Image (cartoon, rainbow, N blue to C red):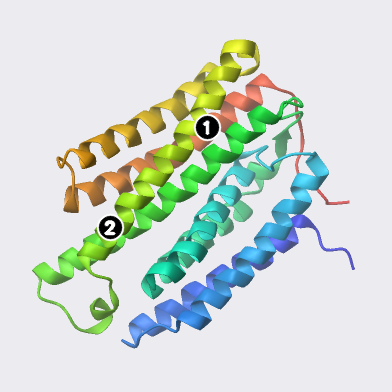
């Protein structure tokens, strides 16, 4: 029996959803979440998603970033990759719950909108490996910013629980503000570094062969990078922290996701498109 790439991605979404359900049940019952169960569900979903994306990449001869469906899938994959490393290091079981939520929403949303995968850009990277490096780094940085948004949400929940003096129930499972702020700062630095490297490659390539890189796409990604860089600068100078930092992290991630649509639209206009559904034969 031949299993298509989309079927593997559906399996991945199912395991992400299972992790979300397990975490929700634990929170509703006021019990500490099982790190093994949630981490295991996310890890299995991650393996299936990796395989599905690999099948797409093998069929297209490059990173599967040819349409909005693949952009959302790869962003979710990047955020999950980072959680599987960061989550174990900092022992944040609640972060696993929210990571499962992000992965489930992004994968199910992309799978549930067939139009996002109806067509994909042909000859996406034009045989230029540097363009592929740029795209891969940029998408991975978006995954980092996604995890930053999750830690920021946890920060706001913990801050609210302390101010309202609700320290029992599911609030008792939240990490400390100090730990969340520490993780958020590191994630912001990592994301800005990755996106900065991606933009450096893009601008060098644009300078050599600018006709092959759309203005809207480059400027949109540069705008996201500049916004996060300014945010990092303000944090380093001590002008942005706590609740304001958390709120801004959430807002910027929503805007970053919005630019994915602009990137896909501008790219579709630049290069020919082919029907989606890789590995459907």
Who's the residue at 71% across and 36% down the image?
Answer: 120
Q: For mark 1, does the 10 Å Cα neighbourhood hold few (<14), some (14 to 19), or many (20 or more) residues? A: many
Q: Quadrant of residue 115?
A: top right
Who's the residue at 51% across and 82% down the image?
Answer: 36
* Residue assigned mark 2: 182
The percent position of residue 247, horizontal first and vertical second, equals 24, 49
Viewer-nearest residue: 253 or 105: 253
| Residue 272 vertical placement versus 44 (above, below) | above
Q: Quadrant of residue 18?
A: bottom right
Residue 200 in view? yes
| Residue 130 vertical placement versus 241 (above, below) | above
Side of 197 relative to 208 (left or right): left
Side of 14 relative to 273 (left or right): left
How many discs mark residues in the rendered view? Answer: 2
Q: Secondary structure at mark 1?
A: helix
Distance between the Cα atoms at labels 2 and 1? 25 Å
The percent position of residue 236, horizontal first and vertical second, equals 22, 40
| Residue 122 vertical placement versus 170 (above, below) | above
């Amino acid at each position: 029996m031949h299993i298509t790439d989309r079927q593997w991605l559906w399996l991945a979404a199912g395991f992400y959803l299972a992790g979300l359900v397990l975490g929700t049940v634990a929170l509703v019952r006021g019990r500490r979440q099982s790190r093994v169960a949630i981490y295991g569900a996310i890890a299995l979903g991650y393996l299936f998603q990796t395989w599905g994306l690999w099948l797409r990449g093998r069929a297209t001869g490059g990173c599967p970033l040819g349409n909005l469906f693949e952009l959302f899938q790869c962003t979710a994959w990047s955020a999950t990759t980072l959680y599987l490393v960061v989550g174990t290091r900092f022992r944040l079981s609640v972060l696993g719950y929210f990571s499962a939520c992000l992965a489930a929403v992004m994968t199910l949303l992309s799978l549930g909108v067939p139009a996002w995968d109806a067509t994909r850009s042909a000859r996406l990277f034009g045989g230029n490996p540097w363009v592929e490096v740029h795209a891969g780094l940029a998408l991975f940085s978006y995954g980092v910013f996604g995890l930053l948004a999750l830690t920021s949400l946890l920060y706001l929940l913990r801050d609210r629980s302390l101010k309202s003096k609700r320290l029992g129930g599911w609030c008792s499972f939240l990490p400390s503000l100090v730990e969340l702020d520490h993780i958020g700062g590191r994630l912001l630095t990592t994301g800005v570094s990755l996106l900065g490297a991606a933009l450096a490659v893009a601008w060098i390539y644009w300078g050599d062969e600018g006709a092959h890189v759309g203005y809207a796409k480059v400027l949109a990604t540069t705008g996201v990078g500049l916004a996060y860089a300014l945010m990092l600068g303000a944090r380093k100078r001590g002008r942005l922290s706590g609740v304001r930092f958390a709120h801004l992290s959430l807002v910027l991630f929503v805007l970053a996701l919005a630019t994915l649509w602009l990137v896909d639209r501008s790219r579709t206009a630049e290069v020919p498109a082919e029907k989606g559904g890789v590995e459907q034969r």
